[in-house]
């Protein structure tokens, strides 16, 4: 899958500047939202971090529902778009790249708001071709993933160091191992999503997210 997307990137001739611009906006917006949440909604929680929200199933269900609707709308709009109106693969510009990067920043603080689903869907709604949208989303993931992994490792190490319960190696190893398996799972998911996207069935991913959102919402209702 990575090789296939890599070939698409070469064929489409992605502009490094667009990736840098989008990634910069992702960092600025994502970190700003994280800081606002931590200093307002979580200000009464000792040593509060954005990760404290991940245990709230109602928020996860809401995020899944919102991204599910976004993906569903993008999929339906793409299917309704006539072949003659499709633009070429170089239809990505600085404005569209910036918007996609900003949306990716909105995904960072909220577990359940699919990064790939949101970025690909927004790009498609902005008129970017499916192949180009997929390529650009993957390129952003390549840049973002090491940063996110490093941030998570430092967070865990800092927390363990503060309590004096572990060394750097023992604290960092679980995070690195978890990130590795998450990366593998991500590649498998990308292959699956790529088939739906290229086959004109992107809306199915939106339906899937909505179903999972309802299941998680029901589990929250049961008290989990």
Image (cartoon, rainbow, N blue to C red):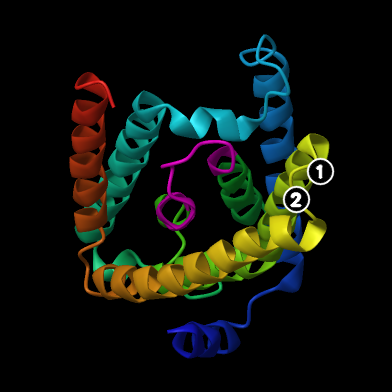
Q: Is residue 181 above or below residue 166?
A: below
Q: Which residue is mark 2?
A: 166
**Residue 104, x across and y down, in percent:** 57, 48
Question: Who's the residue at 26% across and 70% down the image?
Answer: 83
Residue 213 visible in this rendered orientation of the protein: yes
* Tag 1 and tag 2, C-beta contact below 8 Å: yes
Snapshot quadrant of residue 176: bottom right
Residue 87 visible in this rendered orientation of the protein: no
Identify the secondary structure beneath mark 1.
helix
Q: Quadrant of the N terminus?
A: bottom left
**Mark found first going from the N terminus, 1 or 2:** 1
Question: Is 111 situated left or right of 162 in this image?
Answer: left
Q: Which residue is mark 1?
A: 161
Identify the secondary structure beneath mark 2.
loop
Query: Is residue 96 within the magenta segment?
Result: no
Question: Who's the residue at 37% across and 74% down the image?
Answer: 188
Q: Quadrant of the C terminus?
A: top left
Disc number for residue 69: none
- In this view, the residue in front, 151 or 7, is 151
Snapshot quadrant of residue 168: bottom right
Residues drawn in magenta: 106-122
**Residue 204, x across and y down, in percent:** 19, 56
Question: Who's the residue at 73% across and 23% down the image?
Answer: 47
């Amino acid at each position: 899958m990575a090789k296939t997307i890599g070939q698409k990137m070469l064929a489409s001739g992605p502009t490094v500047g667009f990736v840098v611009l989008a990634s910069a906006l992702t960092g600025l917006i994502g970190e700003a939202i994280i800081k606002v949440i931590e200093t307002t909604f979580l200000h009464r929680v000792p040593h509060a971090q954005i990760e404290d929200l991940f245990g709230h199933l109602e928020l996860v269900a809401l995020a899944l529902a919102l991204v599910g609707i976004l993906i569903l709308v993008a999929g339906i709009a793409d299917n309704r778009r006539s072949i003659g109106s499709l633009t070429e693969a170089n239809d990505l510009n600085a404005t569209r790249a910036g918007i996609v990067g900003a949306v990716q920043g909105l995904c960072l603080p909220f577990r359940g708001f699919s990064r790939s689903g949101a970025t690909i869907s927004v790009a498609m709604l902005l008129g970017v071709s499916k192949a180009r949208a997929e390529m650009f989303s993957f390129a952003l993931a390549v840049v973002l993933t090491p940063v996110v992994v490093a941030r998570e490792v430092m967070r865990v190490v800092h927390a363990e160091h503060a309590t004096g319960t572990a060394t750097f190696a023992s604290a960092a190893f679980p995070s690195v191992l978890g990130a590795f398996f998450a990366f593998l799972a991500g590649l498998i998911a990308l292959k699956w999503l790529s088939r739906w996207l290229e086959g004109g069935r992107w809306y199915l991913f939106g339906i899937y997210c909505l179903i999972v959102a309802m299941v998680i919402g029901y589990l929250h209702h049961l008290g989990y």
